[in-house]
Amino acid sequence: MKCFTNVEEAKRFLDDYLREPPSKRQYSVGTMGMSKAIEWLGPEAGIAWLESHIESPCARVWGSLLGMCNPSWQALDRWIHLGKLHCLAAIDALIWYSDPYDSSGYVTTPEGADANLINDALDYALATHLNPRLENAAKEIRQAWPRGGRKRKPVAIPPALLEAAEIVLGSNPDMVLQWRGRMENAKRLPRKLSAIWDSLLDFGQRSDFVWIIDHREELTEVVAAVRSLKGATGLEVNWDQFAKLACDTESALNAIGDEISKNGRNLVCLDRGGDDSPLAIFPAESIPRLAGLLASLGDSDIRVITLS
């Protein structure tokens, strides 16, 4: 995985990309290095770079890169009307929005968009650039945003899990309401306890309360993920020392957890019985309550593990 430590390194990577022959660029645009470089540019500069350098064939990764920049509806609608390549990428970005990271079916609407605006734009795209790719994309997008809006359906959340969600989402009632609304507007509603827990962790990651890491990730990426958590705000920790450790991910996380605990907080894994590790940082006094709430659910895969 390509790692950058500042925006200048990301810009050099992109400059090197532009010097590659077209056949190699078709491969390079889909690499992790490209997505990390665009992320380092930031939303506004990232969108501008993509707009200037998009090229044929317009692979779906261009839409994913655009979606990563979290474009407003104004930006997406402008792309749809710019020309065929930009239109294809913007439509693919809408698919990315409708189901960007997983198969849970939760739909995130671009800022400033609503179902009618999206459907009107699809009508324009189909009328202007009709092809099978756009037709298939339009069907998927209209399922996510049916004209007139999606009907909310209630999800039964166990009281203990609802209280646990308040802790996970920073004791912020508005965030809990957003999470519940997201589930109730999903294409596929979570019914099982494990699916509701997964939805909370996925929403927590999108809101920077949780970061789900793979133990195969490079240590610098793991440290950057922990450092970016909202629970890490204001911590007096020398983060750079951990990126240089010569050890496995588990040992590094325990070392980071030890340092964080000196600040009255704990680094934890919000386990869901998988191979990944959903990480979060909470005040130390909230951990026993969270552990008790999760234990009361009766699912041994749902638990909180303090890392130290």
Image (tube, rainbow, N blue to C red):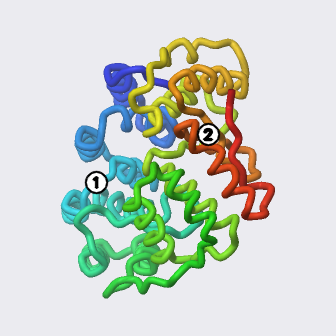
Disc 2/disc 1 C-alpha distance (Å): 25 Å
Residue 13 sits above or below residue 166 on the image: above
Give 200 or 267, whichever is nearer the viewer. 267
Per the image, the residue denoted by label 2 is 213
Residue under the image location 54 percent in, 42 percent down: 211
Asked where in the image residue 114 lies, by quadrant, the reply is: bottom left
State the quadrant of the C terminus: top right
What's the residue type where badge 1 is placed? Pro
Q: Position of residue 48 (x, y in %)?
A: 23, 42
Asked where in the image residue 9 lies, by quadrant, the reply is: top left
Crowd tier of the residue under label 1, counting other residues whose Cα lies within 10 Å: few below 14, some 14–19, many 20 or above: many
Give 168 or 47, whichever is nearer the viewer. 168
Regarding mark 2 in the picture, which secondary structure is present there?
strand
Per the image, the residue denoted by label 1 is 71
Crowd tier of the residue under label 2, counting other residues whose Cα lies within 10 Å: few below 14, some 14–19, many 20 or above: some
What's the residue type where badge 2 is placed? Ile
